[in-house]
Image: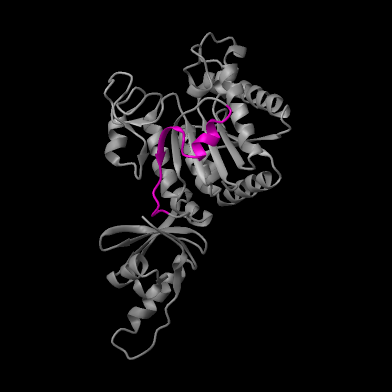
Amino acid sequence: MGKKRIVVKIGSSSLTDDKGEIDQEKFIDHIHAIVALHRAKHEVILVSSGAVAAGFTKLGYSSRPVTIKGKQAAAAVGQSLLIQSYLEKLNEFKIIPSQILLTRDDFSNRERYRNAFSAITELLSRGILPIINENDTVVIDELTFGDNDMLSALVSGFIHADQLIILTDINGIYDENPRTNPFAKKFNYLDNITDEMIESAGEAGSKVGTGGMKSKLLAAKRAISLGVPVFVGYGKGKEKFIDILNGKGNGTYISNGSNGPVNTSRQWIALHSESAGKLYVDQGAEEAILYHGGSLLSAGIYKVKGTFQKGEVVKVYGTSGLLGKGEVSCSSDEVVQAIEKRNEKKGVQSVVSSVEVIHRNKWVKA
């Protein structure tokens, strides 16, 4: 097995005890398994929950806080304690961890998105273990990823991982809840996550599992759309991650061979960018960009909505509705001028030059 880039997501259920505090036995088990990956020369990125669990008792709470301010305060205390625990344990094996706290805004802001990518890849090139968590202390609803499952999926696509491992407290995905139905069927392999599976999952305690299996299905769907194979399941022992990579994991493997890796720029356009305007195209342009790998030219655009500048992202609509998004090579004024010039020349034998508005390499389908 060659060198691989692995994202490991460890959730609260795989880190905590019945009281909601960090379980040291579980924690050390994860450490040993991460060390095994490093010793096998794999690149590892860890997405770790546990900040609130590590911090709430230090604030005098008898159990995990339920208020936003309580969770934020617990995360503020717990994040430093959590990273310190990783530092102390990993230091025994001469592995240096780094801490990266992210919010949704770090992905939607293009410069910060690029900076995060550069920082993570530089850390990996120097043998450092990036430990990523959502910045729970300052994050608000509008800026959240929803949970660390989705964060791990976005990170895995972002850094072009070879495998995403989502650890949970149940050994894979089932058609019903195995804790209430002993005849529930486990899926060992899936090539897709359907909308029906997600809808039937519900929240914690759902038909397909417990502990937020719906969020794991959503994350897996996102990851495989970005060309990253996913494992969702349970593991114990220092060889658990190695076993998962070798196809011997106790869980569900999800992959779709038809989905290749998506370059980082297109990921940003598709998933994180905000649209500055809208373009409406005719059938010829629609067919060119959807089926023939063509760029979008001004000749195929008949209407512009909004004001945008070169380098911004716009939505493109055709006869069947939204077609996709793309980064424009010119401003809205330039597109409007090209349309007006074309309309002026209608019926006249004259060649009107067409402007390239969206290059095919900066275009993503809806």
Where 287 sits versus 313, above or below? below
**In the displayed structure, does residue 105 sit left or right of residue 336?**
right
Residue 69 percent across, percent down from the top left: 53, 21
Taking 123 as reference, is 241 left or right?
A: left
Span colored in magenta: 238-259
The residue sitting at 34% across, 72% down in the picture is: 300
Estimate the x, y position of residue 44 in percent, counting from the top left: 60, 39
* Quadrant containing the C terminus in the rendered view: bottom left
Q: Quadrant of residue 47?
A: top right
Where is residue 12 drawn, in percent x and y? 50, 23
Return the residue nearer the eye: 240 or 258: 240
In this view, the residue in front, 138 or 172, is 172
Q: What colour scheme has been applied to the protein in the rendered image?
A: one colour
Task: Please tell me whether residue 257 belongs to the stretch shown in magenta.
Answer: yes
Q: Please tell me which residue lies in front, 247 or 252.
A: 247
Q: Which residue extends farthest bottom? A: 349
Residue 311: in sight, yes or no? yes
Q: How many marks?
A: 0
Q: Does 58 appear above or below 300?
A: above
Task: Identify the residue shown where x is 41% and y is 75%.
Answer: 338
User: Residue at the spot x=31%, y=89% of the render?
Assistant: 348
Question: Toward which corner of the image does residue 335 lie, by quadrant?
Answer: bottom left
